[in-house]
Image: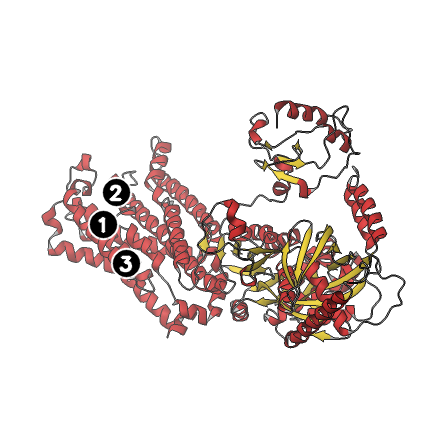
Amino acid sequence: MTREAIDEFRRFQRDKEVNSQLYSKLTVRGSCFIRTDQLDGETDWKLKVAVSCTQRLPALGEDSDPPVHESLSIENTLWASTIVASGTVIGVVIYTGKETRSVMNTSNPKNKVGLLDLELNRLTKALFLALVALSVVMVTLQGFVGPWYRNLFRFLLLFSYIIPISLRVNLDMGKAVYGWMMMKDENIPGTVVRTSTIPEELGRLVYLLTDKTGTLTQNEMVFKRLHLGTVSYGADTMDEIQSHVRDSYSQMQSQAGGNNTGSTPPRKAQSSAPKVRKSVSSRIHEAVKAIVLCHNVTPVYESRAGVTGETEFAEADQDFSDENRTYQASSPDEVALVQWTESVGLTLVSRDLTSMQLKTPSGQVLSFCILQLFPFTSESKRMGIIVRDESTAEITFYMKGADVAMSPIVQYNDWLEEECGNMAREGLRTLVVAKKALTEEQYQDFESRYTQAKLSMHDRSLKVAAVVESLEREMELLCLTGVEDQLQADVRPTLEMLRNAGIKIWMLTGDKLETATCIAKSSHLVSRTQDIHIFRQVTNRGEAHLELNAFRRKHDCALVISGDSLEVCLKYYEHEFVELACQCPAVVCCRCSPTQKAHIVTLLQQHTGRRTCAIGDGGNDVSMIQAADCGIGIEGKEGKQASLAADFSIRQFRHIGRLLMVHGRNSYKRSAALGQFVMHRGLIISTMQAVFSSVFYFASVPLYQGFLMVGYATIYTMFPVFSLVLDQDVKPEMAMLYPELYKDLTKGRSLSFKTFLIWVLISIYQGGILMYGALVLFESEFVHVVAISFTALILTELLMVALTVRTWHWLMVVAEFLSLGCYVSSLAFLNEYFGIGRVSFGAFLDVAFITTVAFLWKVSAITVVSCLPLYVLKYLRRKLSPPSYCKLAS
């Protein structure tokens, strides 16, 4: 597009009275290449290029026909960097930046913080207060002598190891290990951890909110039922339909052969002929023909294997056989319908924007011209198509859609509503198919009004819908189809496992109430013996109040509610409804919008304070996944939107069982033990420093020099402490066999203020024993107290790791001996650091002293006194009050 054309368009764009005639003044002849950087270099604009079908204005003196105007719609939109080979182009910049639909439909995901991290933050704050309090106490005991504020800051530095600075590093490294273990688990292949900050959340879940289609089901539709009003055909009687279709087209072909010598085929629809009850064969023929024509499916033929030619030879390389044909459509329902028509003999062989070809059982090809197409929308809940049979010139308007949308459109009947309910109770997705024959005059009149409506500059969508609705009257009901979306593998045992684990499951779906209820029963989300309370449709506050009172009188029953009723209840009785719904063993919300799904997640978080998990497979589940504390996406047939937006991505729903029971359990237990042990490691050395300062008249003198403090938190104790990420209290098989063990995790007993205080007492006891023991037993060799106490401290930490471990791993043993070896070898070249105050005392480590028997047995005695009581208490607790997993293991 030239710069002059762009400038001219911008001048026109500033005019508020722009109309379709004004657009036609801006024309660009020939082919063009549109680039976003042609607009002042603003390459971040979302540029749309609309192709105008308005004919070029003729030059003076040229003969011309009157111009033909067509409206611009989404079908005419070309995106940025599109190459237009021919035609007239108008450059239009519309809805840029935050006004684009993709941005407006995208919610900013929140920063998810795990419950374990919040609990550790609270404990860290408590430790900070303890640090300040201890420093103030030491200064107070000094008597505020001299510059007491300087001594206060010295004590703050000396006791700073109370604050677990290395806690965050250890936890983040541990979370990375947990994620790696999940992705390497052979039992759940294809698992991807996209958020490495919340693996512990998998072990704390109470509510699981799941989508239905593609999550609990395979999203692979199989045609199961065809109902014609008086007769119904199932999977075992499809051969009868095939026979009727074959006979019908054979009869038509023979009649067409006899009429070849006669006049031209009739062009008018049957209007004056008396209505005669059609035979079953003709009704089946009409139904199958309508199903194979009314859709948006395109047959695709792959290129022959081994052919690597240029693009221009691609069409010649294609194999147009039946075996090489696949169908593409936006909905798997439509593909299932077209595949079924192929199985009964009527095959869709090709389709483009204006025509469609069908192949009959005898091999004859029928051509149809597509005159108009009305795509499916969530508002209309139906789609339609107007086609002309090129052999007979008959024009027919076909339409299919949901029963709620089609019931007012079709002619009166007494079976549609009942049969829709029957099919829905069987778990089938229903579609109502209807048709209407049009004369040439009727269609021309409709086309004229439809074109005028599309050219309207104001309320175009409403006017277009009104014109289409003028056709949707007294349509002939042809059939009712039932398509089954089969459950995924092992959905039933997985849901049962989650229920036994104490997780409450809510199913949020966009399907109708009957279908959702049937899937809930067939998947055992709701037990067949369990009572179900179906929340009737409510539209105002009074009805909602009465229905809530009726629901309150029922106990231990599942709840089924529609999105409209849910909206009314949340508007007037939000707290009461959520409180009642949370008491239900299962909840099914049907006809839910994506916004409602996210709102339900937020309500559960606010009213219960429990951890929620959302799982889905489509773009309509993204908002729910992002709102939940833990989002899980399934890579399904609806794309990867959900899996890419989720925290964890899995291949099948059954993988969630092992993800929660095994990896969620291990992640939470390991992180809880690791966090508390890191705190213990800092508390014990701070206790020793406090005892040391108290002995020396509350002097702010460091017990250990800088390198020893650094080595204590790194090479001397890091490997054994971090090896706790390999610990496990129960085997994976046991965790899967007894999902009831998961209930204990949701109580948060592995990391609480109670366990924290226990570790604080342990740290104070051990730190006091180590320091006082070193001072008592080594009074004559007081200059060696640093080496004595530090050696006993390292041995105590290694033994405490062994005390904490529940299941040994060979890497844990390696870590223990590696750390011990690092400490022993460092004694040879770090001897100057083991003196008390190198500068003032001038004391150095005597290698000969640490090899004496007296040194070894006294250090061992101090270590045993600090650790043996804890081992005894642990043994007694295992015997007298064993945890649940110990009972199962025994």
* SS assignment at label 1: helix
For label 3, the crowd category at 10 Å Cα-Cα, with few meaning under 14, some 14 to 19 and many 20 or more, is few
Q: Name the residue located 14 percent from the left edge and 54 percent from the top edge.
A: 855
Name of the residue lying farthest toward the left: 848
Q: What's under tag 2, amino acid-wise?
A: Leu
Which one is nearer the viewer's eye here, 512 or 238? 238
Image quadrant in which you'd find residue 226? bottom right
Foreground mark, 1 or 3?
Answer: 3
Which one is nearer the viewer's eye here, 191 or 248? 248
Q: What's under tag 3, amino acid-wise?
A: Leu
The residue tagged 3 is 811
Contact, mark 2 vs mark 1 (Cβ under 8 Å): yes
Sequence-wise, which precedes: disc 2 or disc 3? 2
Percent x, y of residue 664: 45, 60
The residue tagged 1 is 789
For label 1, the crowd category at 10 Å Cα-Cα, with few meaning under 14, some 14 to 19 and many 20 or more, is many
Which one is nearer the viewer's eye here, 199 or 515? 515
Q: Name the residue located 41 percent from the left edge and 54 percent from the top edge.
A: 179
Percent x, y of residue 69: 76, 37
Q: CA distance from mark 1 to mark 3?
A: 28 Å
The residue tagged 2 is 703
Which one is nearer the viewer's eye here, 124 or 421? 421
